[in-house]
């Protein structure tokens, strides 16, 4: 079965999410960091990732503000800013990784003959991140319904947020392991492909645009000038 859709190729999304994750953390202290982030946000908007960006932005702003607040304890003004930037740098990478459908990624790996234990590992990680973000959203909604505000009672808010989150993380890990076992996943048996994941024209355009922009910023990072 041949597959065509609006999402980017799973492997392309995975590769560029890793590149953007590493480069974002490297570029945090550069004066053009915000321009770098804006560049890739525009590219993602062009390729219709606006909805995903809107979904993760509240969480990024909350977590970034929390990290900045913690840094104010013994950090300078610039340290506070950089701690927020480090979280904000994750936006492009998270946006791409969230667009990856785990089953399509595994099928793509199988098409290029990647060992099953590697594709299975990626499947678990991506699935865990998706469930983890959903749990955070549900916990935040529960806190709001209980009338707990961070600005009024930060200690109570932290307890109401982090304790359920830790418990759910342990539960999610166990459920994923049981799910794999009940579905008879194996690293030894050769699987068959239900769909063929193809590399569409929009994937080439995205790769060229992103690679060009990334190359420019790497050039600036190593000391080049425009």
Image: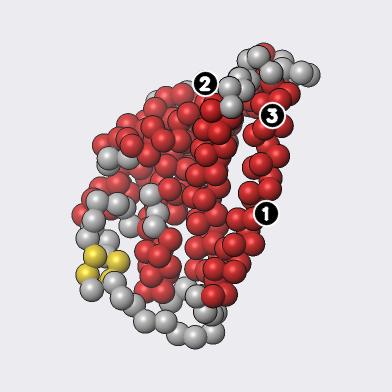
x and y percentages locating residue 225 in the rendered image: 45, 26
Query: Which image quarter: residue 195?
Result: bottom left
Where does label 2 land, which residue?
31
Q: CA distance from mark 3 to mark 2?
A: 33 Å
- For marks 3 and 2, the one nearer the N-term is 2
Residue reaching furthest to the bottom:
189
- For marks 1 and 3, the one nearer the N-term is 3
15 up-or-down from 78: above or below: below
Residue at the image point whose x is 30% and y is 66% from the top: 197
Quadrant location of the N terminus? bottom left
Determine whether, in the image, residue 111 is placed left or right of residue 61.
left
Badge nearest the viewer, 3 or 2: 3
Q: Secondary structure at mark 2?
A: loop
Q: Secondary structure at mark 3?
A: helix
Where does label 1 land, which residue?
170
Residue reaching furthest to the front:
146
x and y percentages locating residue 23 in the rendered image: 52, 40
Where does label 3 land, which residue?
158
Q: Which mark is residue 53?
A: none
Residue at the image point whose x is 62% and y is 23% from the top: 148
The residue carrying pointer 1 sits among few (fewer than 14), some (14 to 19) or many (20 or more) residues within 10 Å by Cα, namely few
The residue carrying pointer 2 sits among few (fewer than 14), some (14 to 19) or many (20 or more) residues within 10 Å by Cα, namely few
Front residue of this view, candidates 89 and 176? 176
Res. 190 visible in picture: yes
Residue at the image point whose x is 33% and y is 57% from the top: 9
- For marks 2 and 1, the one nearer the N-term is 2
x and y percentages locating residue 29 in the rendered image: 59, 26
Determine whether, in the image, residue 178 is placed left or right of residue 20.
right
Q: How many marks?
A: 3
């Amino acid at each position: 079965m041949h597959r065509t859709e609006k999402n980017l190729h799973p492997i392309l999304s995975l590769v560029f999410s890793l590149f953007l994750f590493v480069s974002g953390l490297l570029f945090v202290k550069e004066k053009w960091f915000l321009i770098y982030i804006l560049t890739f946000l525009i590219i993602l908007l062009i390729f219709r990732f606006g909805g995903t960006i809107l979904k993760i932005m509240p969480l990024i702003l909350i977590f970034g503000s929390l990290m900045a607040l913690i840094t104010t304890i013994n950090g300078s003004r610039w340290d506070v800013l950089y701690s927020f930037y480090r979280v904000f740098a994750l936006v492009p990478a998270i946006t791409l990784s969230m667009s990856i459908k785990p089953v399509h990624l595994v099928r793509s790996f199988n098409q290029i003959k990647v060992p099953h234990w590697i594709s299975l590992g990626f499947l678990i990680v991506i699935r865990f991140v998706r469930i983890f973000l959903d749990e955070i959203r549900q916990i935040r909604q529960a806190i709001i319904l209980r009338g707990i505000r961070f600005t009024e009672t930060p200690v109570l808010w932290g307890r109401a947020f982090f304790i359920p989150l830790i418990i759910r993380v342990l539960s999610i890990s166990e459920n994923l392991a049981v799910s794999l076992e009940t579905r008879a996943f194996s690293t030894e048996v050769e699987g068959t492909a239900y769909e063929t994941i193809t590399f569409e024209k929009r994937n080439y355009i995205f790769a060229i645009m992103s690679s060009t922009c990334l190359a420019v910023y790497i050039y600036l990072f190593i000391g080049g000038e425009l």
